[in-house]
Image: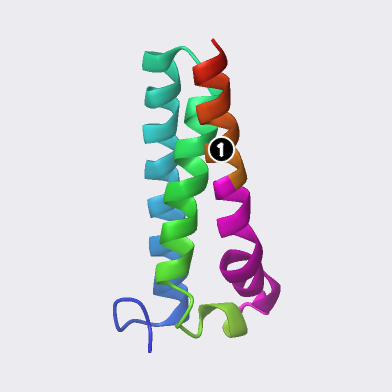
Amino acid sequence: MNLFWSSPTGDMELLIKMLIWIAIVAFIVALFHRRILSGIVVFSILGNIVVLLNVGSRLFYFYDIEWLQYVAVFFWPFLNIFLLGGWFYWRKKR
């Protein structure tokens, strides 16, 4: 099943557009907070959500990037937990 019932090419275009929007949002968050770490945390969490939404599609098999599917499911969430923990610790220490 595809993300929006389109071809893998359409899913890839949508994924790239969403990641570009997420990068813009993360940049704005980093500017307002005046901390690069805030932008990195926002980009990582939202980017993971976007990729996880697309895990069930044929996109990863069509472009031969199955490894990204495994990273998004098994590694990236733990990286986000680590980033959030570091961010909260750093904010509390300040």
Residues in magenta, as a range? 63-81
Structural crowding at the residue carrying mark 1, measured as other residues with C-alpha within 10 Å and reported as few (<14), some (14–19) or many (≥20): few
**What residue lies at 45% left-to-right and 82% top-to-bottom?**
57
**What residue lies at 68% left-to-right and 79% top-to-bottom?**
64
Of residues 51 and 62, the one drawn nearer to the viewer in this rendering: 51
Of residues 5 and 51, the one drawn nearer to the viewer in this rendering: 51
**Is residue 43 covered in magenta?**
no
Question: Which amino acid, by three-letter code, is at mark 1?
Answer: Gly
Q: Residue 74 appears in which quarter of the rendering? A: bottom right
Residue 53, position in %: x, y?
40, 69
Left or right of 18 in this view: 76: right
**What residue lies at 70% left-to-right and 73% top-to-bottom?**
67
**What residue lies at 50% left-to-right and 29% top-to-bottom?**
88
Residue 11, position in %: x, y?
41, 72
Whether residue 52 is situated above or below residue 26 in the rendered picture? below
The residue that label 1 is drawn on is 85
Label 1 residue SS: helix
Left or right of 50 in this view: 63: right
Helix, strand or loop for the magenta stretch, by majority = helix
